[in-house]
Image: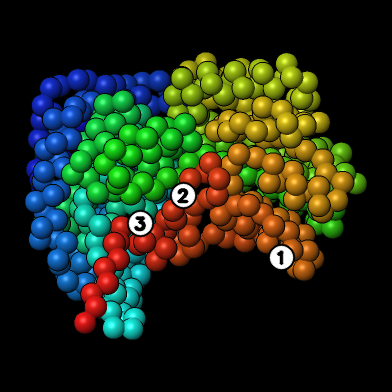
Amino acid sequence: MKNLSHFYINGQWVSPEKPNDFIVENPSNERQIGIISLGTTVDVDKAVTAARNAFNHYGFSSREERIALLEKLLSAYMNRYDEMAQAISQEMGAPIDFATAAQADCGRGHIQTALDALKNYEFQHTSGNATITHEPIGVCGFITPWNWPINQIVCKVAPALATGCTVVLKPSEIAPLSAHVFAKIIDDAGFPAGVFNLVNGDGMGVGSAISSHQDIDMVSFTGSTRAGSLISKSAADTVKRVALELGGKSPNIIFDDVDLEAIVTKGVIGCMENTGQSCNAPTRMLVQESVYDDAVKIATQVANNIKVDSADKPGNHIGPLVSKAHFDKVQSMIKEAIESGATLSAGGLGKPEGFELGHFTKPTIFSNVNNKMNIAQDEVFGPVLVIIPFKDEQEAITLANDSPYGLAAYINTPDETKASRVARQMRAGMVRINWASHHYTSPFGGYKQSGNGREWGTYGFDDYLEIKATSR
């Protein structure tokens, strides 16, 4: 079992002010794999002081200096790439092949994209008689989740470092291993002391201390909409900038002119990937009435063929949910959906056969779902898909937008004119037509209760920059 009780503050691994042990569990087998300490406001104060002192120098560093550091960071990341993939697999249950190919690659991808953006970003230009300068906002507090742990750390940290900001990070206490590996990578790369700081803790303790801290200039949070709202309220007294990437219940519109088997299969797999623990997962499949029954049959067969297994095993399968508490939440939502009258077409309550240990859940599909049902409106964050029929294009648009969320939307039709017309009317931050890829250079974020601001690529720089006009 790994002892990860130290924090990374001012370029050193230091003991917490007051030890408060928290056990880290492997969700595949429920074994204890690590111990962290939950920090206090005193630990946060130390980290913020280090970040503030470092900003006095790093905030005025040159583009060339930051490029050199990010190049070293990318090299250091690749040197620990396998270590990162193993950490992610163990802490949150991503199957090792998926952790290696997808989860760990996010760290590489975001460092590389921030580095490329930095080389060409226009930090200064002239407008009339004024020089317009984009300057680093200062000390940034990051509160990140467990579901794509290094993705959400690096898509914040890389642009912050690229623009000249300094950082205090609180990763998820449930999945902190990858954050510790990343702190070692920062140290390997030789960033100046205090530029990056890591303090473990929970939301009520360290998270609240970061969001309300008077010497933190902006907060970026990824997680639930409920927690995002609380962070905004906590940050309001100090009028700091708040960037939020929150929940989703993304529609996947399937018209009757598609290759139904191929598109439905992609939709089911897209929902179940990462065991459904992705905010942008296509969890509401909207299918045109004329092919609805066939789509349900195809989706049911696909779900029944999805393999569930331990995260340490190679192969194409989904792993466990991240924790017992999250397993219980997903189970309660499945139970409520059954009781509300939705048709259980695949999966259901309980664990898959042969899995007594671990937080494994059956890939589950509900059909004959009304969009007003809780299972169609609330984010499950598990391998649960609802399939809803629609009559025509206008009803598809209405159903797709009938959600408190607006993170992503998926549109499937070979009719490019129709696809563009529907995409224009989606109230969502990201629209994917016929399963086109969403690249690291594209903005990531949503409308409505899915948050504010955008991450990834050049668009991710904006949250970390202030604008100054100097008139002459």
Instruction: Kindly state the secondary structure of the residue where label 1 is placed.
Output: helix
Out of 8 and 317, give the one closest to the viewer. 8
Where is 69 relative to 366, above or below?
below
Give the quadrant of residue 26.
Answer: top left
Out of 180 and 157, give the one closest to the viewer. 157
Q: Position of residue 170 (x, y in %)?
A: 28, 38
Name the residue that disc number 2 marks.
452
| Residue 420: mark in rendering | 1
Q: Residue at x 74, y 43 (%)?
A: 399
| Position of residue 149 in the picture relative to residue 435 (left or right) | left
Q: Residue at x 42, y 63 (%)?
A: 459
Earlier sequence position, callout 3 versus callout 1: 1
Query: In the image, what residue type sits under mark 1?
Result: Ser
Q: Residue at x 78, y 64 (%)?
A: 418
Distance from Cα at disc 3 to Cα at disc 1: 29 Å
Out of 304 and 177, give the one closest to the viewer. 177
Out of 132 and 405, give the one closest to the viewer. 132
Distance from Cα at disc 1 to Cα at disc 2: 24 Å
Crowdedness of circle 1 by 10 Å Cα count: few (<14), some, many (20+)? few
Name the residue that disc number 3 marks.
463
| Position of residue 403 in the picture relative to residue 234 (left or right) | right
In this rendering, which labeled residue sits more in front, label 3 or label 1?
3
Where is 387 relative to 131, above or below?
above
